[in-house]
Amino acid sequence: MLAGGTLAAVTLTGAVALGAAVGETSIPVETVLKTVANRLWAAGYALDPIDEGIIWNYRIARALVAACCGASLALCGAVLQSLLRNALADPYILGISAGASSGAVAVAILGLGSGFLTLSLGAFAGALIAFGLVALLALGAGRGPAAIILAGVAGSQLFNALTSFIVTKSATADQARGIMFWLLGNLSGVRWPDVWLAVPVALAGFVLCQGHARALDAFAFGTQSAASLGVPVKRVYAALIAAAAFMTATMVSIVGSIGFVGLVIPHAARLLVGVRHGVLLPASALIGAAFMVAADILSRTIIPGQVLPIGVMTALVGAPAFAMILIHRPVAR
């Protein structure tokens, strides 16, 4: 257990350090570590002020948010796939991403909130509204896993159509370009205030989900079997679905829509560590964090002088990876 925790800490630290070092201007990892030491412990290393400013004010914050986003989405995917007993379940199946997109568009284009709502707050509000509507629809449709998935698909289609309607009807050309870039996932505007939001949400979500690891193991045999094993099915269901919705809404409100992380990473983690959730959940979070940092590095370096939306990179890598997983481990009929 201690060795696994140490390995996870080293992996995360290395990924964040690499994310801070690599970019249009490469900076040695040693400089990154010295910058952190100067800022946190006043170590007094003599560094170039420009390099130190780039590392601390921009790249470290970006890498930390990317890691939190990847960990949260992968964790949500692992939980939802177990709860709903559906290999294709992921955080966006609940309609949260589509609702966040509509909220962001309503603030940016329609001016809702009269200047009091930022793009991120509008996205967060839209995500929660979408989840509420999907939850009500699922309750009316029968409360089971199939009802939640179908309600999420319906909610996603509704809010995607609403987003397209608003952009088509009211957006200028510049607004449409800005919104489309945000919808594809964007880490360019991330700063330290976003870190102070993303880190506590990711940690709290992980602790909550990990605390229900044994209950998730029981759900593998169905809700009736879980109930017979003493699992409070309704309470666990509600707590984990709400946690997944809250984590996804928070991350989408910060960075926009990012696909395939919550779908692919849990499957990859199962291939590596098995299906026991006590190990699967930490592995999913760790692999998701490292994957997102790596995707962010690629998005900044694959085309010189241009930054690609992070959602494009995750899809370009995630889709072939998911195809390979399907070939290696076919879905049972």
Image (spheres, grey):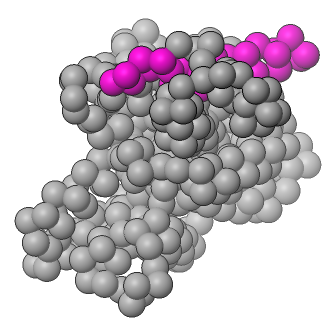
Residue sitting nearer the eye, 30 or 321: 30
Horizontally, residue 161 falls left or right of residue 2, namely: left
- View extreme (bottom): residue: 114
**Residue occupying image coordinates x 37% and y 13%:** 324
| Residue 82 belongs to the span the image colors magenta | no
**Residue occupying image coordinates x 62% and y 13%:** 30
Residue sitting nearer the eye, 316 or 215: 316
In the picture, the quarter occupied by the C terminus is: top left
Q: Position of residue 171 (x, y in %)?
A: 14, 73
Q: Is residue 328 above or below residue 20?
A: above
Q: Position of residue 110 (x, y in %)?
A: 26, 83
**Residue occupying image coordinates x 22% and y 29%:** 305
**Residue 112: quarter of image:** bottom left
State whether the magenta stretch is mostly helix, strand or loop. helix
**Residue 226: quarter of image:** top right
User: How many marks overall?
Assistant: 0
| Residue 12 belongs to the span the image colors magenta | yes
Q: Position of residue 255 (x, y in %)?
A: 44, 51
User: What is the span of residues highlighted in magenta in the rendered image?
Assistant: 1-27
Q: Is residue 118 above or below residue 256?
A: below
Q: Is residue 299 visible?
A: yes
Horizontally, residue 165 falls left or right of residue 88, namely: left
Residue sitting nearer the eye, 264 or 27: 27
Q: Is residue 83 above or below residue 29?
A: below
Q: Position of residue 109 (x, y in %)?
A: 24, 77
